[in-house]
Image (cartoon, grey):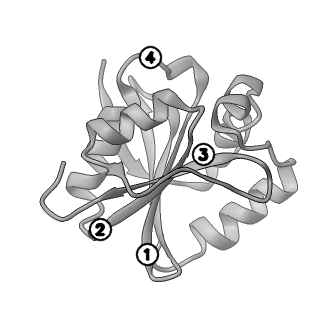
Amino acid sequence: MNVLLREVTDEDLPIFFEHQREPEANRVAAWPARDRDAYELHWRTKGLGSAGVSKQAIIVDGAVAGFVASWTQEDRRMLTYWLGQAFWGRGVASLAVAEFLDHHEAMRPMHAFVATSNVGSRRVLEKCGFRAAGEPVTGEDGVEELEMRLEAGAG
């Protein structure tokens, strides 16, 4: 399996849109799917069109498998990733996040939030050096999340 990262392009957005509509992905991530217009608006204004956002498409054997990205929010550097369900369970996310952190995002500490029910994503973050930063917190949406942090020199 060949996993590589490249800059996100407009052509990736329809694929990412379909990935974020997968019911099992929404359930596991505790994140609702957006409609096409809202999804593309978010990517065009906060992703593709925003300085300070680092975003890479995850490519597996030539196919767009998902993305990994970072941005600054409330003076913290944040990390997110999303992987199409067809690519789960093969080590793709761990490889892609590690590559991103090693070659595309040097800022530390790095923060990520994960639904406590999303055991797979927490494991990916832990493999990449993230550790729990406090106790889980239940948000206004009723989702219990855990903040994970990657310190300088970790990973």
What residue did someone put label 2 on? Answer: 109
As measured in the structure, the alpha-carbon distance from the residue carrying label 3 to the one carrying label 2 is 29 Å
Q: Which residue is mark 4?
A: 89
Of callouts 4 and 3, which one flags the residue occurring earlier in the amino acid sequence?
A: 3
**Structural distance between the alpha carbons of marks 4 and 3:** 22 Å
Q: Position of residue 123 (x, y in %)?
A: 38, 32
The x and y percentages for residue 12 are 60, 45
Please report the residue visible at 63 percent of the width from the left and 70 percent of the height from the top: 46
Q: Nearer the viewer, mark 4 or mark 2?
A: 2
The answer to which of marks 1 and 3 sits earlier in the sequence is 3
Mark 4 vs mark 2, CA separation in Å: 27 Å
> Comparing marks 1 and 4, which lies closer to the viewer?
1
Count of marks overlaid on the render: 4
Percent position of residue 153, x then y = 12, 60
**Is the residue marked by circle 3 packed among few (<14), some (14-19), or many (20+) residues within 10 Å?**
some
Vertical relation: 23 (above or below) 11: above
Badge 1 vs badge 2, beta-carbon distance below 8 Å: yes
Circle 3 residue: 12
Amino acid carrying mark 1 in the image? Arg
| Mark 1 or 4, nearer chain start | 1
Dot 4 amino acid type: Gly
Query: Which amino acid is tagged 3?
Result: Asp
Seen at 77% across and 54% down, the residue is 39
Please give left or right for residue 131 compared with residue 144 in the image.
left
Instruction: Tell me: residue 14, above or below residue 85.
Output: below
Q: Which numbered tag is attached to residue 10? A: none
Residue at the spot 42% in from the left edge and 27% down from the top edge: 62
Return the residue at label 1.
76
